[in-house]
Image: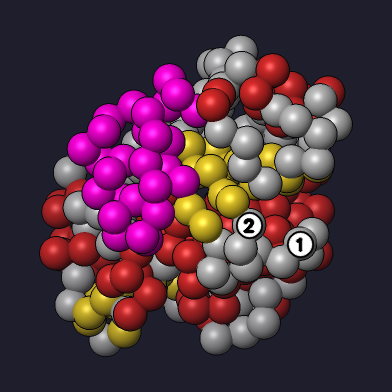
């Protein structure tokens, strides 16, 4: 029931039409008894978007591509982990002061920790954007050995330096044999589902392969990895974990994790 006390939350990015965030968070609000709605907004000018948060009293915002880094100077305060990452994916509005956080680290680390100890594992991260930064910092904080593979050498080397890792060009990634490989690029996302950042013969049995793309649920990369005997982690795992952390920041309540996952899974059927 929407009334004059209903609080507004949203997703800012471009594109956003594919996002299951509104479905997931709005269902979680109902379950937790929160009088709130969560909507997706395609934003072209992030500065104007942030001005609207203040003007309309929007209580919380998820930030996605391409604004996770450019939004930082527009905020009043940014917490330590988000500063370390250099990217914000969550904004909380407290009395018209905007606080930035990063829940992508937790989103990436939690699914992996259920399968293995990250410490001393050789981890190849594909990409060097805002999501890659969060994943890399999360893995570094768990004492993993980081390799950044990226088309842009400048951005790739910058991220590798930030986490005291190595850099390789994406074209040379086939020379590697990591324990864990994580795709943080948008390659393979709907509608370009036939794309993949690496070829099928790159994958070796016993690798753990994770893709942060969750639409489709099983990307071409994950299908290729599974066919080669790898353990795979779909993008929904990271999405739900980071979303649960956002929900807790939004509301101060424990997230209904299982319900959030079931809700998003049902949307793919």
- Distance from label 2 to label 1 (Cα)? 9 Å
The answer to whether residue 126 is above or below residue 86 is above
Q: Is residue 221 at all visible to an observer of this figure?
A: yes
In front here: 145 or 242? 145
The answer to whether residue 137 is above or below residue 69 is below
Which segment did they paint magenta? 147-173
Q: Is residue 265 left or right of residue 95?
A: right
Earlier in the chain: of badge 2 and badge 1, it is 1
Residue 28 at x, y percent in the picture: 67, 66
Is 27 covered by the magenta stretch? no
Q: Which mark is residue 172?
A: none
Q: Are marks 2 and 1 in contact (CB under 8 Å)?
A: yes
Residue indicated by mark 2: 121
Q: Residues within 10 Å of mark 1 (few under 14, many from 20)?
A: few
Is 166 covered by the magenta stretch? yes
Query: What's the residue at 81%, 34% (across, down)?
Result: 205
Query: What's the residue at 32%, 70% (across, down)?
Result: 84
Image quarter hosting the C terminus:
top right
| Element at label 1 | loop
In front here: 148 or 130? 148
Q: Is residue 195 left or right of residue 231?
A: left
Residue 18 at x, y percent in the picture: 54, 34
Residue 199 at x, y percent in the picture: 61, 17
In front here: 240 or 197? 197
How are the residues colored? secondary structure
Query: What's the residue at 56%, 78% (across, down)?
Result: 248
Image quarter hosting the N terminus:
bottom right
Q: Is residue 233 left or right of residue 63?
A: right
Q: Which mark is residue 116?
A: 1
């Amino acid at each position: 029931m929407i009334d004059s006390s209903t609080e507004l939350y949203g997703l800012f990015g471009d594109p956003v039409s594919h996002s299951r965030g509104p479905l997931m968070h709005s269902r979680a609000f109902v379950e937790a008894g929160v009088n709130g709605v969560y909507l997706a907004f395609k934003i072209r000018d992030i500065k104007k978007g942030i001005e609207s948060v203040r003007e309309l009293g929007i209580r919380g915002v998820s930030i996605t591509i391409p604004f996770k880094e450019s939004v930082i100077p527009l905020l009043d305060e940014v917490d330590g982990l988000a500063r370390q990452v250099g990217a914000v994916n969550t904004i909380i509005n407290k009395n018209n002061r905007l606080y930035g956080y990063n829940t992508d680290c937790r989103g990436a680390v939690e699914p992996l920790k259920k399968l293995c100890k990250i410490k001393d594992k050789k981890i190849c991260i594909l990409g060097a954007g805002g999501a890659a930064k969060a994943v890399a910092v999360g893995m570094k904080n768990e004492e993993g050995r980081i390799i950044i593979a990226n088309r842009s050498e400048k951005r790739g080397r910058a991220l590798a330096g930030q986490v005291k890792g190595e850099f390789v060009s994406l074209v040379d990634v086939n020379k590697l044999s990591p324990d864990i490989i994580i795709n943080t690029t948008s390659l393979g996302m709907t509608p370009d589902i036939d794309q993949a950042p690496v070829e099928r013969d790159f994958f070796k049995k016993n690798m753990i392969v994770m893709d942060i793309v969750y639409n489709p649920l099983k990307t071409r990369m994950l299908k290729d990895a599974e066919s080669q005997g790898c353990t795979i982690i779909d993008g929904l795992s990271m999405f739900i974990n980071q979303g649960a952390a956002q929900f807790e920041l939004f509301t101060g309540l424990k997230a209904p994790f299982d319900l959030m996952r079931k809700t998003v899974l049902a949307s793919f059927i």
